Image: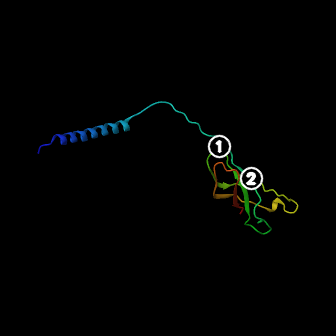
Amino acid sequence: MQLTKSRKSLAALVAGVLVISGVAAFALWSSTGTGSGNARALSAVNITVTATTGDADLYPGFTEGDVFFTSANTNPYPVTFTSMTSGTVTSGDETNCPASNVTVANASGLSLLVPAGATATPGTIAAC
């Protein structure tokens, strides 16, 4: 069987494309380079958590009250709280409601998201 001139040209073209593709792939995967670069990391900013007044759910004998707060995150990325360590409990009326009457347990297993740039994100954690 004889190949015509156009078939020979097509076969040569296909072979040429395959060779060029192989050379390009080899060059792409085997190339190396050197040089210098730099990057700068941001400094994390502390999240501000402020106690707020929530539902009136603290009274004698009730053990399921909540801790209410707002949080501010000025970082350019979101932050997720996964635990809470309780601090000192204070009372606005120490005579009628001494702080010593209230206890707040530490909490773990939380997933409280504070969005990037948030200024007053409300939050609640079960106190017991």
Residue lying at the far front in this picture: please name it: 6
**Residue at the spot x=50%, y=30% of the render?**
36
Q: Count numbered badges in the picture.
A: 2
Can you give x and y, in whole percent of width and height, for residue 102 in the image? 79, 61
Q: Quadrant of the C terminus?
A: bottom right
Drawn side of residue 120 relative to residue 97, left or right = left
Which residue occupies the foreground of this view, 79 or 107?
A: 79
Residue type at tag 1: Ala
Quadrant of res 121: bottom right
Which residue occupies the foreground of this view, 97 or 13?
A: 13
Instruction: Find numbered disc 2 in the image and state the secondary structure of the residue it sits on.
Output: strand
Drawn side of residue 107 relative to residue 24, left or right = right
Residue type at tag 2: Thr
Which numbered marker is on residue 59? none
Q: Quadrant of the N terminus?
A: top left
Residue lying at the far left in this picture: please name it: 1
Can you give x and y, in whole percent of width and height, for residue 42 in the image? 62, 40
Q: Earlier in the sequence, mark 1 or mark 2?
A: 1
Packing grade of label 2 (10 A; few <14, some 14-19, many >=20) is few
Instruction: Find numbered disc 1 in the image and state the secondary structure of the residue it sits on.
Output: loop
Residue lying at the far top in this picture: please name it: 35
Can you give x and y, in whole percent of width and height, for residue 70 in the image? 72, 54
Which residue, given by chain and number where applicable, does mark 2 sit on?
50
**Residue at the spot x=22%, y=39% of the render?**
12
Packing grade of label 1 (10 A; few <14, some 14-19, many >=20) is few
Which residue occupies the foreground of this view, 21 or 49?
A: 21
Which numbered marker is on residue 44? 1
Can you give x and y, in whole percent of width and height, for residue 4 in the image? 15, 42
Residue lying at the far right in this picture: please name it: 95
